[in-house]
Image (cartoon, grey):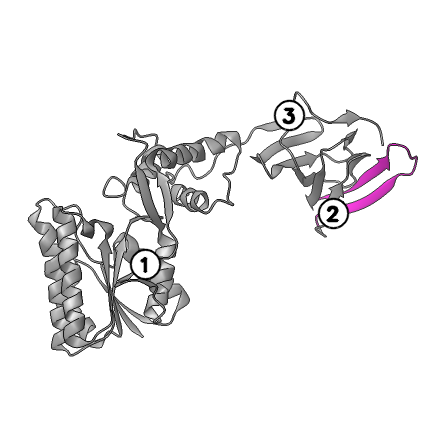
């Protein structure tokens, strides 16, 4: 297919084009406000599908709403009619088209123009009334509260929330792109005469801000948000895309002594804690057991042995481990255990424990293996 995308450098356009280029062999005609107008004529003549994403939402003058959202749409449809190209046309409208404001009026006018075009030409038209769209590459301090909050909080800039109880309906950019990709294959989803993105999220402005601030704090806390909650997962990915480029990394507290080091990497309230343990040659760590706490050890560099002994037994069980053969060793409760570095270099072990360490109730009891 040959696919025309207007507003190619905009938020949705950039994400859609990236996915089209990654997942298909379609020829993409990219049109934006700085593209030569003569190319638009060529594109309208050849296109097999049109994604009309160009529009105006933050003009200097209110009259620009109608010129950008109605006027350019009219030009685009006139060119398609001129070349008798009745290919499907998708247009990005807004839920504000139902409201009586200059922006909504201009979007509504664009919708009606497209409906009339369909009646006249028989072309399939796909009108999406998008709610608030969020995700990577959205311009902050422009027309997206999520983008502004993510950018400002990540850059230690102030934010303003007039009413945290305001309810919002949002759609994630990847879900939007998936819906548009389906539409280009004739698999759009409709509610009445409008096309819809099937996955939406309802939340409040205050909840969004609380989540984003928790994402920022998670670095110092070594925590990870609850990725089982879809909106949290998508918002966290969005937040990371706004990190300052010189602050992608952050330090961890290394607990260092003559034996090596122990460093907490990630802690979660429901999935436990991950740490990195480095043992010097000849060093043995551990010699303790747990009632309920359980662990998984994974040696990723070096070589050693993990020893176990049940509390009421003299039998010692040994598992020889090495970074040359990655294998996970479970540390069951009721067994005292240790790990010894048998090599000539540092041994690095990834350790997972099922609960975050609680100094008031450590559940760690010393006993030599």
Magenta segment includes 313: yes
Per the image, the residue denoted by label 3 is 358
**Of the residues under marks 1 and 2, which one precedes in the sequence?**
1
Q: Which mark is residue 24?
A: none
Q: Secondary structure at mark 3?
A: loop
Whether residue 302 is visible:
yes
Q: Nearer the viewer, residue 244 or 176?
A: 176
The image shows residue 1, relative to residue 104, as above or below, that is below
Q: Which region is colored magenta?
A: 302-323
Residue 272 location (% of width, % of height): 62, 37
Determine whether, in the image, residue 343 is placed left or right of residue 231. right
Residue 86 location (% of width, % of height): 20, 76
Residue extending farthest to the right is: 314
Dominant secondary structure, magenta: strand
The image shows residue 326, relative to residue 219, as above or below, that is below
Report crowding for label 2: few under 14, some 14 to 19, many 20 or more residues within 10 A (C-alpha): many
Residue 68, image quadrant: bottom left
Magenta segment includes 305: yes
**Which of pointers 1 and 2 indicates the residue nearer the eye?**
1
Per the image, the residue denoted by label 1 is 196
Whether residue 52 is visible:
no
Q: Are marks 3 and 1 in contact (CB under 8 Å)?
A: no
**Of the residues under marks 3 and 2, which one precedes in the sequence?**
2
Q: Secondary structure at mark 1?
A: loop
Report crowding for label 1: few under 14, some 14 to 19, many 20 or more residues within 10 A (C-alpha): many
Q: What is the CA distance from the residue labelled 1 to the residue labelled 2?
A: 53 Å
> Who's the residue at 46% across and 47% down the image?
230
Determine whether, in the image, residue 155 is placed left or right of residue 143. right
Per the image, the residue denoted by label 2 is 322
């Amino acid at each position: 297919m040959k696919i025309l995308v207007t507003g190619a450098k905009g938020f949705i356009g950039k994400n859609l084009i990236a996915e089209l280029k990654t997942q298909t062999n379609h020829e993409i005609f990219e049109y934006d406000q700085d593209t030569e107008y003569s190319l638009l004529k060529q594109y309208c003549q050849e296109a097999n599908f049109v994604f009309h994403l160009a529009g105006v939402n933050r003009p200097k003058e209110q009259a620009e709403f109608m010129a950008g959202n109605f006027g350019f749409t009219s030009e685009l449809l006139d060119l398609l009619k001129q070349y008798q190209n009745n290919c499907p046309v998708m247009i990005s409208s807004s839920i504000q088209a139902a409201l009586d404001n200059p922006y909504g009026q201009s979007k509504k006018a664009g919708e009606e123009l497209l409906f009339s075009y369909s009646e006249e030409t028989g072309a399939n038209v796909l009108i999406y009334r998008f709610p608030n769209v969020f995700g990577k590459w959205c311009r902050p301090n422009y027309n997206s509260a999520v983008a502004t909050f993510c950018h400002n909080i990540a850059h230690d800039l102030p934010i303003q929330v007039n009413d945290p109880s305001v309810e919002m309906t949002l759609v994630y950019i990847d879900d939007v792109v998936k819906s548009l990709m389906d539409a280009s294959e004739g698999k759009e989803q409709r509610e009445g005469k409008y096309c819809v993105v099937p996955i939406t999220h309802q939340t409040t402005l205050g909840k969004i801000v609380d989540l984003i601030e928790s994402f920022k704090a998670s670095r110092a806390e070594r925590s990870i948000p609850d990725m089982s909650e879809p909106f949290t997962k998508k918002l966290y990915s969005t937040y990371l895309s706004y990190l300052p480029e010189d602050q992608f990394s952050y330090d961890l507290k290394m607990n260092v002594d003559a034996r090596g080091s122990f460093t907490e990497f990630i802690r979660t309230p429901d999935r436990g804690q991950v740490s990195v343990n480095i043992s010097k040659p000849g060093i043995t760590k551990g010699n303790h057991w747990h009632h309920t706490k359980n662990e998984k050890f994974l040696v990723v560099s070096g070589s050693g042995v993990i020893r176990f002994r049940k509390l009421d037994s003299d039998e010692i069980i040994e598992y020889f481990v090495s970074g040359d053969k990655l294998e996970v060793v479970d540390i069951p409760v009721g067994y005292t255990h240790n790990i010894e570095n048998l090599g000539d270099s540092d041994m690095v072990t990834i350790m997972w424990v099922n609960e975050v360490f609680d100094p008031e109730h450590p559940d760690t009891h010393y006993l030599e293996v």
